[in-house]
Image (cartoon, rainbow, N blue to C red):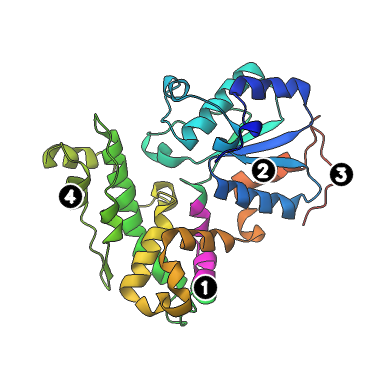
Amino acid sequence: MPDDENRRTPDELATLDIVEPGMKEVIVEGRSDAGLLRWFFSQVAPDADIALFAVTDRVLIDSDTITDRGHNTGPRGSVVSTAEIISGKAPRSSRVLFVADRDGDSFGLDACPELDNIVYTDFAAMELYCLSIKTIGKVLSVALRAPKHITAQSVIDAITPALVTLFRIRATLRSMPEPKKLAAKVIDQLQFNASGSDLDPEAALERSGKGYSRKDLSETLSRFEVPEDSDKRYYIRGHDIAAVFVRYVASMHPNLLREDRRHFAQPTAMEICMMSSLEIVDLEPYELFKKLKEYALTGADGASSESSKVA
């Protein structure tokens, strides 16, 4: 449960810019994001004093305020709405920095307002930084002890089409007059073979979109096409990566999820494993982490902190 002693309304957070202008804090969507960034700051700016919070642990904001601003309720809507409110009341503030996923921005489903106090992931979500040869390769070699012939590239190539299709299906369900959620069994029962996955978009939509005709669902799905030459990381839901990865391994290499590796069959455990496999050198080239490092090394007065030691 969130600690109410730390929670403040957006107006109260804006007031803190006047009362405590030198106290920096970063507010993110979830606790795993906060954990990743806490580790990142400890490596690139170990002397920086930055408080990190998941939005539910720091912000008190009602759902009407979020929806009135055109955002969906939930962690992302809370982050973006709070950033907007504080920006309106303290436009020159550099005390609080917000971090949000781009989510459905690539399909025009989520707004990413350009404000001085918010930064966005380079791709659809924080977990997309894990979808790389180096990180997946580390998970395969260290966590699952996979043999050399099971390569990171082959796994990424195998799961990416299914991940993108799931993103399109979710966008379709979300865009219906009464939005629906993807049925859990669509991923839970996903199977892979040498030719790919057995994911059937029409069947997944029919299972998830109760009350809508197959024709309406199919027509809506056709609106969400992904350009062939695009970076697919803009069209993948972050939490789907670990879940689909697990389904691929369970289908194609089930022996890798046995004995002392059984717990990795749980998507939540696999996601933690993936996020823990990220390294500073992999993150620093991306714009999000460049901005976060700059924020950490800059004082409240806007001057670069010479006392910070960069790893």
Q: Which residues are magenta?
A: 127-139
* Tag 4 near tag 2, CB within 8 Å: no
x and y percentages locating residue 80 in the rendered image:
52, 30
Query: Is tag 4's residue or tag 2's residue first in the polypeptide sequence?
Result: 4
Disc 4 marks which amino acid? Glu
Q: CA distance from mark 4 to mark 2?
A: 41 Å
- Secondary structure beneath dot 4 equals helix
**x%, y% of residue 64?**
43, 21
> Up-down: is 97 above or below 84?
below
Q: Earlier in the sequence, mark 4 or mark 3?
A: 4
Q: Amino acid at mark 1?
A: Ala
- Residue named by callout 1: 143
Badge nearest the viewer, 1 or 3: 1
Residue carrying label 2: 292
Query: Which element type, helix, strand or loop, lies under badge 1?
Result: helix
Observer-side mark, 2 or 1, equals: 1
The percent position of residue 284, horizontal first and vertical second, equals 65, 53
Determine contact: label 4, label 3, CB under 8 Å.
no
Which residue is at the front of the view, 282 or 6?
A: 6
**Which of disc 1 and disc 4 is earlier in sequence?**
1
- Three-letter code, disc 2: Leu
